[in-house]
Image (spheres, helix red, strand yellow):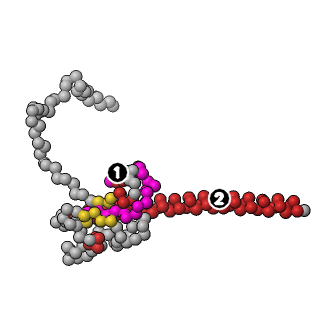
Amino acid sequence: MRRRNGFTYLAVLFIIAIMGGGLALAGEVWQTTAARAREAELLYVGNQYRKAIERYYLNGPGLYPRNLADLVKDPRKPDTVRYLRRLYPDPVTGKDEWGILKAPDGGIMGVYSQSNAVPYKQDVFRPRDQTFKGAPTYQEWRFLYEPPVAASAKPLPNPGFPALAPQPASPAIQTPISPPLPATR
């Protein structure tokens, strides 16, 4: 009888150890999933700030907002003009504070997370976020708007090379045009 009680005790301890290991693994998976969700939200919110800064810049005399609150209500307009519905907190840190990227005119040209955590996502970004590739921390994910550089309307001549005029297509390459088919009744 005593041997049987010892065996049951060992079986219960073994089952508890297996359950503990399974719960630890489940907790790690849950933590990774939650971190990836916060990372995806950071990409969304950061791009919302980028788009709002762009709309603010383009909807006025080409100036950046002086503070983030200007994106919620544009002080340059007599009516209420909103580029964001509200100021979003940083999803990774959970705080309302963002890192600010200053523009040459003293305004805000972008934001970034102040988290020192290492991003899970290291590759396969959208074209607008390609600079995030391989970033060591979330602080390197810079959501900024830079206006496109105005290109001159007329290309500059290339000195030393003659201008090439368009040449007609070679007769050997042209496809022959067949005569229309006669109508059949």
Q: Position of residue 160 (x, y in %)?
A: 9, 32
Locate residue 12: give its quadrant. Answer: bottom right
At x 28%, y 29%, the residue is 181
Locate residue 96: give its quadrant. Answer: bottom left
Magenta stretch encompasses residue 114: yes
* Residue 72 appears in the picture as rendered: yes
In screen coordinates, is 46 left or right of 176?
A: right
Q: Residue furthest right?
A: 1
Label 2 SS = helix
In screen coordinates, is 160 left or right of 142?
A: left
Image: magenta residue range? 109-128
Q: Position of residue 32 (x, y in %)?
A: 52, 59
User: Which amino acid lies under the numbered mark 1 shown in the image of this protein?
Assistant: Gln
Q: Earlier in the sequence, mark 2 or mark 1?
A: 2
Main SS, magenta residues: loop
* Residue 59 appears in the picture as rendered: no
Q: Which residue is mark 2?
A: 21
